[in-house]
Image: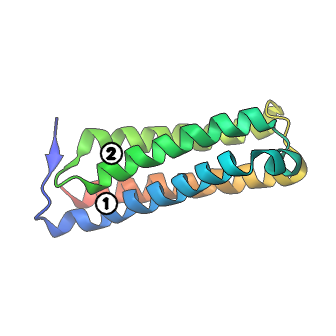
Amino acid sequence: MTALTLTSDRTKFLRLALAADAVVTGVNGLAYLAGADLLSDLLGPGAGLLRGIGAFLLVYGLGVGFLASRPAISAAGTRTVIALNAAWAVGSVAAVVTGAAGFTVAGAVWAILQALVVAVFAELQVMGLRRTR
């Protein structure tokens, strides 16, 4: 497993990009878990699906936060986060386009905005990983 050293100033940007992703993802997951019934009416998908997404996001956010907190950041772990973020962004757009999630208009807008945020995190992480070389 390839790891980047903590002592390098080149890892600060990557660490920040991962940490910000972890916080935003974790807060989003908590919101879905705590407010699934209210959010279901607003966004469209059922409360059970939102709770499942919330649980996933919470665990994922914790994992990304763990990666960001390590003395040495794993390049392979970072590439995995980038790939999962890209998949989430594409999947969110696909869910809106196909109607698979049953979004309301507000839910479709939220899903697209969320996809954009996740795509930005992926790009920042790509930039951070490149800076470590």
Instruction: Tell me the SS state at disc 2.
Output: helix
Residue 69: image quadrant is: bottom left
Residue 19: image quadrant is: bottom left
Which residue occupies the extreme front position in the image?
Answer: 34
Q: Which quadrant is the C terminus positioned in?
A: bottom left
What residue is shown at x 75% (from left), y 54% (from top)?
110
- Kindly identify the amino acid type of the residue bearing the numbered disc 2: Thr
Q: Are marks 1 and 2 in contact (CB under 8 Å)?
A: yes
Q: Of callouts 1 and 2, which one flags the residue occurring earlier in the amino acid sequence?
A: 1
Query: Residue 114 at x, y = what percent?
Result: 65, 54
- Judge the density around disc 1: few (<14), some (14-19), many (≥20) Cα neighbours within 10 Å: many
| Colour theme | rainbow
Q: Which quadrant is the N terminus positioned in?
A: top left
What residue is shown at x 12% (from left), y 56% (from top)?
5
What residue is shown at x 75% (from left), y 45% (from top)?
36
- Kindly identify the amino acid type of the residue bearing the numbered disc 1: Leu
Residue 86 is marked as none
In the rendered image, which residue does mark 1 sit on?
14
Instruction: Tell me the SS state at disc 1.
Output: helix
Query: Residue 98 at x, y = what percent?
Result: 80, 32
Where 95 sits versus 36, above or below?
Answer: above
Query: Residue 33 at x, y = what percent?
Result: 66, 45
- Judge the density around disc 2: few (<14), some (14-19), many (≥20) Cα neighbours within 10 Å: many
What residue is shown at x 68% (from left), y 50% (from top)?
34
In the rendered image, which residue does mark 2 sit on?
78
